[in-house]
Image: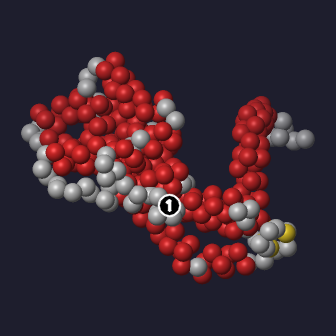
């Protein structure tokens, strides 16, 4: 070995690389075993031959061709993307003002914590209970219709409130809004009050401060919240099945129905398509903001 290869700096660098590899190896092994290999298995199964009562490992593109040429499944993709976009916008519109109030206008950390805990109280009960609880609210004889009729705003029950795409949007927005509130509140809480005070001293109005300071500094929180909401909404099936009366067909519902029918290959195709959509959404979100730099 040469003197350069045995220099203390080089030996120390090699030792640091070995130590870093040892520290990373459990995480890498976990990712390979429980993420990469299962995903590769799903892709492989999507090319298996599917018959009425069985699936064989003979590779074919029949399931892919059927999925990509059937209007029902193409409509399911469009419906999934449309509902995802609508819920994403709705959670930002509803969640941002709540996060703004908690993160900037509430000075006490104790009160902030209490308000955030109040936002997650619904998660103390079952997911299905939270979904089904909307039925007595949105039904033709539900609370909303009864209140509107007693106030004289309507003269007959509104039928679109339940078992429709509207009810699915309402349910998903309520369920996942907290995942938008949390990250935005965290980022707003990091804004130094002195920055806002300096802007006020310079004569900036509230809307100027909001547009030029608050929104840019809270954008990483919006992106993180959007990732959380997107992953969960795109993979949804229970809310759509419970509140739409199976009138809204999402990719998640197709996967569940195909697995229930033991059509593993076709379910794998839908799973791969859904994974590609989620990956594209997350990649786009991460391109908007460098989270490693901002968080």
Position of the C terminus, as image quadrant, is top left
Q: Quadrant of residue 130?
A: top left
Q: Is residue 75 visible?
A: yes
Residue shown at 21% from the left, 34% from the top: 196
Q: Quadrant of residue 200?
A: top left
Circle 1: element type: loop
Residue at image mark 1 = 246
Pick whichever, 273 or 9, lies toward us. 273
Colour scheme shown? secondary structure
Q: Is residue 283 visible?
A: no
Pick whichever, 82 or 291, lies toward us. 82
Pick whichever, 212 or 18, lies toward us. 212
Residue 206 rendering spot, x and y as whole percentages:
14, 41
Residue shown at 77% from the left, 54% from the top: 37
Residue 127 rendering spot, x and y as whole percentages:
51, 40
Residue 72 rendering spot, x and y as whole percentages:
54, 75
Pick whichever, 201 or 79, lies toward us. 79
Number of numbered discs present?
1
Residue 289 is left or right of residue 76, and the answer is left
Determine crowd level at label 1: few under 14, some 14-19, many 20+ residues with C-alpha closer than 10 A: some
Q: Is residue 94 above or below residue 8?
A: below
């Amino acid at each position: 070995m040469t003197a350069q290869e045995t220099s203390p700096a080089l030996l120390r660098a090699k030792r640091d690389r070995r130590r870093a590899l040892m520290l990373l190896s459990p995480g890498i092994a976990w990712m390979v075993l429980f993420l990469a290999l299962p995903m590769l298995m799903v892709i492989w199964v999507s090319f298996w031959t599917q018959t009425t009562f069985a699936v064989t490992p003979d590779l074919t593109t029949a399931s892919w061709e059927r999925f990509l040429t059937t209007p029902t499944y193409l409509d399911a993709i469009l419906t999934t993307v449309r509902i995802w976009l609508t819920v994403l916008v709705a959670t930002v519109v509803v969640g941002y003002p709540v996060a703004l109030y908690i993160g900037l206008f509430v000075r006490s950390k104790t009160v902030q914590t209490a308000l955030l805990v109040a936002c997650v109280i619904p998660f103390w009960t079952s997911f299905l209970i939270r979904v089904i609880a909307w039925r007595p609210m949105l039904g033709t004889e539900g609370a909303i219709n009864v209140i509107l009729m007693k106030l004289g705003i309507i003269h007959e029950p509104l039928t679109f409130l339940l078992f429709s795409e509207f009810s699915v949007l309402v349910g998903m927005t309520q369920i996942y809004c907290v995942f938008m509130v949390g990250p935005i509140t965290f980022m707003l809480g990091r804004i130094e009050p002195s920055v806002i005070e300096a802007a006020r001293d310079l004569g900036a109005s509230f809307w100027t401060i909001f547009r030029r300071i608050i929104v840019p500094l809270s954008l990483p929180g919006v992106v993180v919240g959007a990732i959380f909401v997107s992953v969960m909404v795109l993979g949804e099936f229970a809310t759509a099945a419970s509140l739409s009366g199976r009138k809204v067909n999402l990719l998640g519902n197709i996967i569940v129905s195909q697995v229930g029918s033991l059509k593993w290959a076709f379910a794998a195709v839908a799973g791969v398509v859904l994974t590609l959509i989620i990956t594209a959404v997350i990649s786009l979100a991460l391109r908007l903001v460098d989270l490693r730099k901002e968080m």
